[in-house]
């Protein structure tokens, strides 16, 4: 497992797509500095920066880029057949790759989230939203790794999911919030930070239970789907 994780990390960090992870975190911090330096109160800009830019855009987009890359690139170029030809349980391939995706996504999101939280209200808010974003990284990464195995167009489908479901429906239609990863992450960030600046739309028990359920379901889907691949890279 450690070998698979190392190869995945080296390949991921060596690809150009890794450079796509940098603009959003930098932009988020820059946007937060503008109202802070102009003297605006946190209540005036926290929702737009932390929620709209952070939890609605930065976190899922980074997870999409990374999650679809840890297995998707190998499927596209055919190198997955080399791994599949070996007598390795499929979960021992999926799990380390997923852990790499989670680690890279969580680390990429943690830095801007902490900085913006600290700028807005101090270290407690920064740490709280890092906790929430880490939970979100786990769930989103699992979803997008599974999506890279289920579809030949995982990035396109992932963008539709991020924009339509997480970006629009979960914020406009109250009934969809119980099925929104964004809402789970926000709720956990809100409880961890104990800050009045964040608003949550689902209860903490729902957020915790649904986070576990969604992660386990999509992990099982990913393992089973990879198990259906033949050494030619096609599903059987």
Image (cartoon, helix red, strand yellow):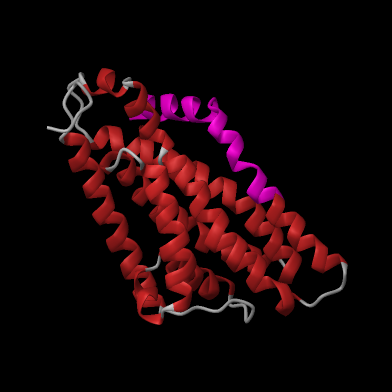
Q: Is residue 44 left or right of residue 179?
A: right
* Number of marks in picture: 0
Residue 47: quarter of image: bottom right
Q: Residue at x 47, y 40 (%)?
A: 66
The residue shown at (45%, 58%) is 162
Residue 182 pos. (x, y %)? 46, 65
Q: Nearer the viewer, residue 129 or 47?
A: 47
The answer to whether residue 211 is magenta is no
**Secondary structure predominantly adopted by residues drawn in magenta:** helix
Horizontal arrangement in the rendering, residue 236 relative to residue 53 (left or right) = left
Pick whichever, 165 or 208, lies toward us.
165
Give the quadrant of the C terminus.
top left
Q: Is residue 225 above or below residue 80?
A: below
Figure check: 129 above or below 25: below
Q: Residue at horizontal 42%, vertical 55%?
A: 160
Viewer-side residue, 175 vs 212: 175
Residue 144 horizontal/vertical position (percent): 37, 47
> Magenta stretch containing residue 17, yes or no?
yes
Start-end of magenta stretch: 1-26
Vertical order, 140 against 18 (above or below): below
* Viewer-proximal residue among 207 and 162: 162
């Amino acid at each position: 497992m450690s070998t698979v994780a190392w190869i995945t990390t080296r390949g991921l960090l060596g690809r150009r797509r890794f450079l796509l992870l940098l603009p959003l975190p930098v932009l988020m911090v820059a946007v937060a500095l503008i109202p802070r330096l102009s003297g605006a109160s946190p209540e005036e800009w926290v929702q737009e920066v932390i929620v709209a830019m952070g939890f609605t855009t930065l976190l899922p987009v980074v997870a999409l880029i990374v999650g679809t890359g840890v297995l998707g690139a190998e499927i596209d170029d055919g190198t997955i057949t080399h791994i599949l030809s070996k007598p390795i349980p499929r979960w021992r391939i999926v799990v380390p790759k997923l852990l790499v995706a989670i680690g890279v996504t969580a680390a990429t999101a943690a830095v801007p989230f902490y900085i913006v939280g600290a700028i807005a209200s101090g270290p407690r808010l920064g740490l709280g939203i890092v906790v929430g974003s880490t939970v979100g990284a786990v769930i989103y990464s699992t979803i997008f790794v599974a999506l890279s195995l289920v579809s030949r167009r995982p990035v396109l489908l992932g963008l539709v999911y991020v924009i339509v479901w997480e970006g629009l429906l979960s914020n406009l239609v109250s009934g969809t919030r119980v099925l929104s990863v964004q809402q789970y992450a926000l709720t956990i960030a809100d409880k961890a930070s104990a800050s009045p600046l964040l608003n949550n739309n689902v209860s903490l028990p729902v957020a915790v239970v649904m986070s576990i359920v969604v992660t386990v379901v999509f992990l099982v889907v990913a393992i089973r789907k990879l198990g259906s691949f033949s050494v030619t890279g096609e599903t059987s």
